């Protein structure tokens, strides 16, 4: 023992020696606290258990390669929203002008917060529950809230995969089953199904053949057996991909992450060869600059950035926790963020190319229908032949010729023009029809594909792409549940994965009723948005203000080998929390201004109609928001008032083979936010009061009166593989 050690001085002096924990760590020789007088927790030494704890961090599963990890993060962040949400927002909010606010918010909100989640997961090597319990036990509810939101999202997200599976298997026939309206025989007379005739073949197939939807959320209608089977298949796929943890899910990512890019590129090449594709792309890139001044555009861009990267779900933290601690997570954050952005742009190009083709088809159909009306009016002398320009040929009528006739008739018959019922048939009107979500994937896109040569092939490719996009996101979402639960409660991975999939399938039966689509809309709109915004704000505050941005930057410097840009310091500390607070406020205002409702399909009218949620549905909606947010205040109150043990005033320190393991829990006051073990122990603030007497092995310390309840996963998190220079 060093001669200048205060413990050595104690042996030669009768004076009471005062020494901090940091000084002890700096000067004492390596001693196993369970086998020495420095055992301050009262635990007995179990050699076998001790060896298991030492190897725990080393035995933690790890990615087979950096490529596998990157593909997993890309597969998680790039999901269905990139294909059917981003193009809709781009179309709705000013075309190319929308890319500006999106890119700005991606840089000042998305990238810093994505980097933050990657860093804490990689540093602490635990799931979301363990990470936030470690950083600030009073905010440990963040991890539990993330798990609940992941559960809610996984419930309905897998239903969408089930729909895609149904369409995938229906695509193996020619012609495609949604290309024509079904014919119903009424005795000897064959008539087209009325509901289909009044809407369209693809709309009818979606609402009647696929969902067999009821007219309101109050009409359950019983289970739709076809969708029930598809949901079972979807959960089976997820369970098989997850059952071995990242050993199995990582291999799945090679296909599920890369295949969508192959399909998107194929669709883009094919789409550009279609007539009218250029019209759609030009419509996309024509900027409406006035939209950039609309606050609503910025709010929707911020929300899309937030969900596109999967912030707050816990999946990002779970995946990064399997990395080596010297991995360059800053590079990963930048790479995945911008791949996500460029994927959204690529998907938007594909969607607008196909929608441009569809718009031309629909516009030609409109011209033909209205030309027949004009011929009828000419034959009945409602219109004079003198109104028709001499060069117009009705057998080969172009859109330009029709517009010329339309303007002449509108000018001459100004007083009675509306009675004629003629449409303008403008291409821009077709392109401006905003569709998103299921309306884009299962109605608009499927209708466009019916006009493709070899349409079944393209349909199979498209829905296989949707399945893979959904599967990649579902693996990340489920990892946001399984990783923290397994880390914290030490349950068997296989048993928990299978059990959670079965339970989720049973609960998910609510979404495969005939009214199930309305519940999908409810969960999609309200179960995650507000709770996740609060979760990410608290994550940001926990790291930047409670743990400390300077200390976090120093830890990153030690972990990465270089100091991150000061840009991150200011975004974490000021910019991101303010922006997220504004987004949360805007979301609450939007919730209050727009009464919650849904679009119901009315069979008799063959059209959608907006309906407000009934009282019982509003109760479910509010319960979803409260339940997802409940762990945040609940855990804070329980730990603040010591209603549950969080290891307060307990600090277990063990030296083994030159490595330090520490079990830090919620020390009283704000001491847990100041305690950090740096390379220079003298610079480390003591986790205990400044002058606490060292009473020796025979003394009674306040620490001995409150031993760690379970030593490892109950209140603190033991890092067996953490070097002395690390946390």
Image (cartoon, rainbow, N blue to C red):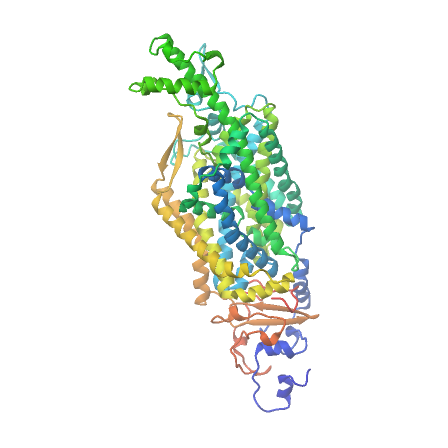
Residue 356 shows in the view: yes
Q: Residue at x 42, y 32 (%)?
A: 221
Residue 356: x and y, percent? Answer: 51, 29
Number of numbered callouts drawn:
0
Residue 427: x and y, percent? Answer: 46, 26
Q: Quadrant of the N terminus?
A: bottom right
Residue 195: x and y, percent? Answer: 42, 23
Residue lying farthest to the right in this orientation: 657
Residue lying farthest to the left in this orientation: 415
Q: Residue at x 43, y 37 (%)?
A: 518
Residue 140 shows in the view: no
Residue 632 figure quarter: bottom left
Left or right of 368: which side holds 14? right
Position of residue 726 relative to residue 408, above or below, is: below
Residue 18 figure quarter: bottom right
Residue 496: x and y, percent? Answer: 58, 50
Q: Quadrant of the C terminus?
A: bottom right
Left or right of 375: which side holds 460? right
Which of 500/551 is in front? 551
Q: Residue at x 64, y 83 (%)?
A: 5
Position of residue 264 relative to residue 683, above or below, is: above
Position of residue 665 relative to residue 606, above or below, is: below
Left or right of 566: which side holds 219? left
């Amino acid at each position: 023992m060093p001669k200048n050690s205060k413990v050595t001085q104690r042996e030669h002096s009768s004076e009471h020696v005062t020494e901090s924990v940091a000084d002890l760590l700096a000067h004492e020789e390596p001693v196993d606290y369970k086998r020495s007088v420095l055992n301050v927790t009262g635990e007995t030494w179990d050699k076998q258990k001790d060896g298991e704890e030492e190897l725990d961090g080393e035995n933690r599963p790890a990615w087979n390669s950096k490529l596998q990890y990157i593909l997993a993060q890309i597969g998680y962040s790039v999901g269905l929203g990139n294909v059917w949400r981003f193009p809709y927002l781009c179309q709705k909010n000013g075309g190319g002008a929308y890319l500006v606010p999106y890119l700005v918010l991606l840089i000042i909100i998305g990238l810093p917060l994505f980097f933050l989640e990657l860093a804490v997961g990689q540093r602490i090597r635990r799931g979301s529950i363990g990470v936030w319990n470690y950083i600030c036990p009073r905010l440990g509810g963040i991890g539990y809230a993330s798990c609940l939101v992941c559960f809610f999202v996984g419930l309905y997200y897998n239903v969408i995969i089930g729909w895609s599976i149904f369409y995938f298997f229906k695509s193996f026939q020619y012609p495609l089953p949604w290309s024509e309206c079904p014919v119903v025989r009424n005795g000897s007379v064959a008539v087209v199904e009325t509901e289909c005739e009044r809407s369209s073949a693809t709309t009818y197939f979606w609402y009647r053949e696929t969902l067999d939807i009821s007219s309101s959320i109050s009409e359950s209608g019983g289970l739709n057996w076809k969708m029930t089977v598809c949901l079972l298949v979807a959960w089976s796929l997820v369970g098989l991909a997850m059952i071995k943890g990242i050993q199995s899910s990582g291999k799945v990512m090679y296909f599920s992450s890369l295949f969508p890019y192959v399909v998107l590129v194929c669709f883009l090449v094919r789409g550009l060869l279609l007539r009218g594709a250029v019209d759609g792309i030009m419509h996309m890139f024509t900027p409406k600059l006035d939209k950039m001044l609309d606050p609503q555009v910025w709010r929707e861009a911020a929300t899309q950035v937030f969900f596109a990267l999967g912030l707050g779900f816990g999946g990002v933290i779970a995946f990064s926790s399997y990395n080596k601690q010297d991995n360059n997570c800053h590079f990963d954050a930048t790479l995945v963020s911008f791949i996500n952005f460029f994927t959204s742009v690529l998907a938007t190009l594909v969607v607008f190319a196909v929608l441009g083709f569809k718009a031309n088809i629909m516009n030609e159909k409109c011209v033909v229908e209205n030309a027949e009306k004009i011929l009828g009016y000419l034959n009945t002398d409602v219109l004079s032949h003198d109104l028709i320009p001499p060069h117009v040929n009705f057998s080969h009528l172009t859109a330009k010729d029709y517009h010329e006739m339309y303007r002449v008739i509108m000018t001459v018959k100004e007083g009675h023009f509306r009675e004629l019922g003629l449409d303008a048939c403008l291409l821009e009107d077709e392109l401006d029809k905003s569709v998103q979500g299921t309306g884009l994937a299962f109605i608009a896109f499927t209708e466009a594909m019916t006009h493709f040569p070899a349409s079944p092939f393209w349909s199979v490719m498209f829905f296989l792409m949707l399945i893979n996009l959904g599967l990649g996101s579902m693996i990340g979402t489920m990892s946001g549940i399984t990783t923290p639960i397994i880390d914290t409660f030490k349950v068997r991975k296989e048993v928990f994965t299978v059990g959670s999939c079965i339970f989720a399938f049973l609960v998910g039966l609510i979404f495969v009723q005939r009214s199930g689509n309305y519940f999908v809309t409810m969960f999609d709109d309200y179960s995650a948005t507000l709770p996740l915004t609060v979760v990410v704000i608290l994550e940001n505050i926990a790291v930047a203000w409670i743990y400390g941005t300077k200390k976090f930057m120093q830890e990153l410097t030690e972990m990465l080998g270089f100091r991150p840009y000061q840009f991150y310091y200011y975004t974490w500390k000021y910019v991101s929390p303010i922006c997220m607070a504004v987004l949360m406020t805007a979301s609450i205002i939007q919730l209050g201004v727009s009464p919650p409702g849904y679009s119901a399909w009315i069979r008799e009218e063959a059209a959608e109609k907006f309906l407000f949620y009934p009282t019982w549905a509003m109760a479910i909606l509010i319960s979803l928001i409260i339940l997802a947010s409940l762990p945040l205040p609940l855990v804070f109150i329980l730990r603040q008032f010591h209603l549950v043990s969080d290891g307060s005033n307990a600090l277990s320190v063990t030296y083994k083979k030159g490595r330090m393991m520490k079990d830090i829990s919620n020390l009283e006051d704000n001491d847990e936010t100041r305690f950090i073990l740096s390379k220079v122990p003298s610079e480390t603030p003591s986790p205990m009061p400044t002058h606490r007497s060292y009473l020796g092995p025979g003394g009674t310390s306040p620490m001995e009166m409150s031993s760690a309840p379970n030593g490892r996963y109950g209140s603190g998190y033991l890092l067996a593989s953490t070097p002395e220079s690390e946390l």
